[in-house]
Amino acid sequence: MKGAIMQTTTFYSYHALSQQAFWPGIMRYIIIGIGITLIAGYFIVRLRDRNLTKYRDLLIIIELIVLLTIGIQARDVQANRSALKNSQAVTTLLTSIAKNEHLKPSQVYASDKSVYSGLLIQLKRDRKQTYVITVDPNGKSYQLNHTHLVSDHVTYIED
């Protein structure tokens, strides 16, 4: 196959999926909370000051821009929480597969950070033990079907 693009299949270890950044998320919440409190307090104090009429409109515009920025950060926090929840679902699935296959969770790898039908699972870093997963619509059960990788290039992410 001349000119074919070499695709790499990436598999994530149990450890890589379970070690999501927890403290940065907490710090982000704390900083956003402090920022909102400070801005609201400053905004209330400055609007009550009758001597500051010359720059009042400029102050309101700046504070609205800061609040918009905080709103964007809050949206990013929600996206991070969603990604963390998906990673936790995959680690639960990997633990279940490891238990059923009589392996340690560290010997089971997933090709993505969220659970869905079509997710690739590999046992013991062995290309011959690669499976595609089918998840029932409720997400309460799964089925492993043996499959073969097209690409020879496989990357494993441990941390």
Image (cartoon, helix red, strand yellow):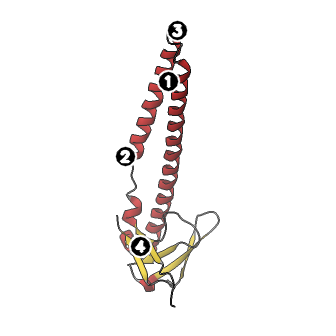
Question: Is residue 62 depicted above or below 120 in this figure?
Answer: above
The earlier-in-sequence mark between 4 and 1 is 1
For the residues carrying marks 3 and 2, which lies nearer the camera in this image? 3
The amino acid type of the residue labelled 3 equals Arg
Q: Could you tell me which secondary element the residue under label 2 belongs to?
A: helix
The earlier-in-sequence mark between 1 and 3 is 1
Disc sitting over residue 108 in the figure: 4
Residue at 52% across, 52% down: 82
Residue 26: give x, y in percent of width and height. Answer: 40, 42
Residue at the right extreme of this rendering: 137
Q: Could you tell me which secondary element the residue under label 3 belongs to?
A: loop
The amino acid type of the residue labelled 4 equals Val
Q: Left or right: 32 with respect to 118? A: left
Q: What residue is pinned by disc 2?
A: 23
Q: What residue is pinned by disc 3?
A: 50
Q: What residue is pinned by disc 1?
A: 40
Q: CA distance from mark 3 to mark 4?
A: 66 Å
Q: CA distance from mark 2 to mark 1?
A: 26 Å
Residue 87: give x, y in percent of width and height. Answer: 47, 59
Crowding at mark 4 (Cα within 10 Å: few <14, some 14-19, many 20+) = many
Q: CA distance from mark 4 to mark 2?
A: 26 Å
The earlier-in-sequence mark between 3 and 2 is 2
The earlier-in-sequence mark between 4 and 2 is 2
The amino acid type of the residue labelled 2 equals Trp
Crowding at mark 1 (Cα within 10 Å: few <14, some 14-19, many 20+) = some
Q: CA distance from mark 1 to mark 3?
A: 18 Å
Residue 13: give x, y in percent of width and height. Answer: 39, 68
